[in-house]
Amino acid sequence: MSRFRAPVATAVAIAFGLIVLASLFIPALLELRALILSWSILLAAFALLLGLVNLFQVHFKRIQDNSKPVYSFVLLAGMLVAFFVTLFQGRQGVVADWLFNSIQLPIETSLMALLAITLTLAAVRLVQQRNDFASIVFIGALFLILLGSAPLFGLELPIFSRALTPYINHVLAVGGMRGLLIGVALGTLTAGLRILLGSDRPFGG
């Protein structure tokens, strides 16, 4: 049965991929492409729901096995409260908006602050282990950005905040990010072509 499913899944993936690709050049296929994309969104929603069910089962089993039950209980309680509040009120509801602004947003802000400290410590360790030109450039750019992002002991340094840091953020960093995005796009294109040609089969054996 599995040997039969693999070629069928490959043929279906190739067919739908070619239809979506052809719709970019054939206007008559636009409605069919919209229907296929709607199906994809629906399937992705069901996959997300199955992921939530699996997450619930894993942490519920941890509570039963008394394996770090406090963390699992907090996670399940927060997940269920956010799920049902959003389900009944919508994402623009009063309680859902309060949950986002009062709980999720401060947590994300704290994680970003922790990420900045972690990057700084990683840069220091990098220089200690690899004292080469690339490491020195990296840690120098990092400290320039940190000095220009916030006042130092209440004193603003114009040469950093108005000249060097904006140049690094808007010129050098943007150039590097565009290079990374081009690489990601080429990799995605290659993976899509391999799926269309049947070389890769991430959907089955």
Image: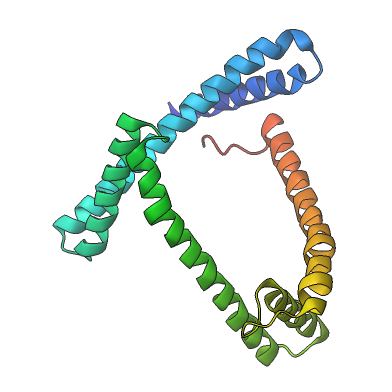
- The quadrant holding residue 86 is top left
Q: Is residue 40 left or right of residue 69?
A: right
Residue 136 locus on image (x, y percent): 78, 85
Residue in view at x 66 percent, y 78 percent:
151
Nearer to me, 15 or 111: 111
Q: Quadrant of residue 2?
A: top left
State how the image is colored. rainbow
Which residue is rendered at x = 36% and y = 48% of the image? 99
**Residue ID at (45%, 55%):** 105
Depth order, front residue of 81/63: 81
Please determine whether, in this image, residue 159 is positioned above or below residue 105. Answer: below
Q: Residue furthest top?
A: 28
Q: Is residue 108 above or below residue 80?
A: below
Q: Position of residue 135 (x, y in %)?
A: 75, 82
Name the foreground residue: 156 vs 173: 156
Q: Is residue 6 above or below residue 113?
A: above
Q: Position of residue 145 (x, y in %)?
A: 72, 74
Above or below: residue 82 compared with residue 162: above
Quarter of the image for residue 102 reads bottom left
Q: In what quadrant of the picture does the N terminus appear?
A: top left
Residue occupying image coordinates x 53% and y 66%: 112
In the drawing, does residue 190 fall left or right of residue 16?
right
Q: Position of residue 32 (x, y in %)?
A: 64, 12
Q: How many marks?
A: 0
